[in-house]
Amino acid sequence: MKALIIGAAGFVGGHLINHLAADCGYEVYATKLAHETLETENASVHNLDILDKNAVSELLNEIKPDEIYHLAAQSSVRLSWDKPQLTADINIKGTINVLEAVRDSGCSPKILLVGSGEEYGYLQPDEIPVKEDTLLRAGNIYAATKACQGMLGEIYARAYGMDIIMVRAFNHIGPGQSDIFVIADFCRQTVLAELGKKEPVISVGNLAAQRDFTDVRDIVRAYSSLMKSGKSGQTYNVGSGTARSIQQMLDMILEKSSVSIEVRQDQARMRPSDVPVIAADISRIKNDTGWSPCIPLDRTIDDIMDYWREREK
Ligand code: A2R
């Protein structure tokens, strides 16, 4: 089985490469942007910018994959406020380029489009945990582009009979994530304080927001389970099913620190619009694939702290 992972130099890509190659025995092809580095023995690596549709077509014709995992994105909510055009270009136009390139290719791979739990936006208390057919009320620009990607996936599946599955992934965390994301940021700041490389103060934004956090290694297992037994044209939530406040997560991280750390609110870390509570109903993926998350949060945080201790030592 040949799998192509588009946008594999990011956080999820490395974990997905390892899972598909080592646990599933796939022949794995992975793409990255020319300026990115992706060192792996588990995949054949190609440069690809999804804004170049001809390049996507050429690569598909060369590889002829059975499965395509589309991860490439501008995936930061914070950056989407500063760079709305770039976010729309990559997340919407880029996805259309991938889908059109598949249509032109004459092959019919199964495609997984990775969207986000952020697409739901402002949820009412009685809508949580949120089911896939809930109205999308995107609360930020990143979320709006991912909602659009999901609609495009449904349209291409219906109009052209393409084998496409949409995912709404809730917050994933784990070793290797960039510290532009909140949990990686807190863990890195804590480790730097432990190492005496910064004062023992952690800068935080909105701690009241509640999110659904899942270990990235559980997330990539979900993606391959969906490729095996997810239904074409269907959208699936992938998350833990539990909402935890950023404050709770911070407390768990600080408990693991070897030094005492002061928490300081930083206005610059507040977002223009923050959705208060997000949590997934994961019955659909459980029913259709048998997947459920299995890595305890405590182990995930230990692994993230160890990742930063190793990187920053
Ligand atoms: O933005 P960069 O330089 O970090 O590169 C990202 C890459 N990417 C692209 N790849 C091909 N053509 C483009 N025009 C393009 N623009 C950006 O996609 C990055 O290496 C990768 C996405 O990885 P991350 O940002 O680390 O996302 P993550 O956490 O791996 O999530 C995978 C998917 C994304 O679609 C998220 O929006 C979704 O899961 O939650």
Image (cartoon, rainbow, N blue to C red):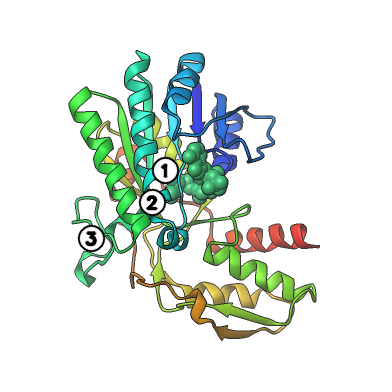
Q: Which residue is mark 3?
A: 137
Q: Which of label 2 and label 1 is nearer to you?
A: 2
Give the residue displayed 22% in from the left and 56% down from the top: 136
Give the residue displayed 36% in from the left and 22% down from the top: 102
The answer to whether 188 is drawn above or below residue 204 in the figure is above
The answer to whether 149 is drawn above or below residue 197 in the figure is above
CB of mark 2 near ligand 1 (< 8 Å): no
Q: Is residue 103 visible?
A: yes
Alpha carbons under labels 1 and 3: distance apart = 21 Å
- Residue 261 percent across, percent down from the top left: 67, 83
Give the residue displayed 71% in from the left and 70% down from the top: 191
- Residue 177 percent across, percent down from the top left: 59, 54
Looking at the image, which is closer to me, 21 or 195?
195
Give the residue displayed 69% in from the left and 30% down from the top: 41
Relative to residue 76, is residue 202 drawn left or right?
Answer: right
CB of mark 1 near ligand 1 (< 8 Å): yes
Q: Which residue is mark 2?
A: 85
For badge 2, the amino acid type reads: Gln
Q: Residues within 10 Å of mark 2 (few under 14, many from 20)?
A: few
**Precedes in sequence: disc 1 or disc 3:** 1
Q: Which residue is mark 1?
A: 90
**Precedes in sequence: disc 2 or disc 3:** 2
The image quadrant that residue 14 belongs to is top right
Q: How many numbered marks does the figure carry?
A: 3
- Residue 10 percent across, percent down from the top left: 56, 45
Q: Which of label 1 and label 3 is nearer to you?
A: 1
For badge 1, the amino acid type reads: Ile
The image quadrant that residue 280 belongs to is bottom left
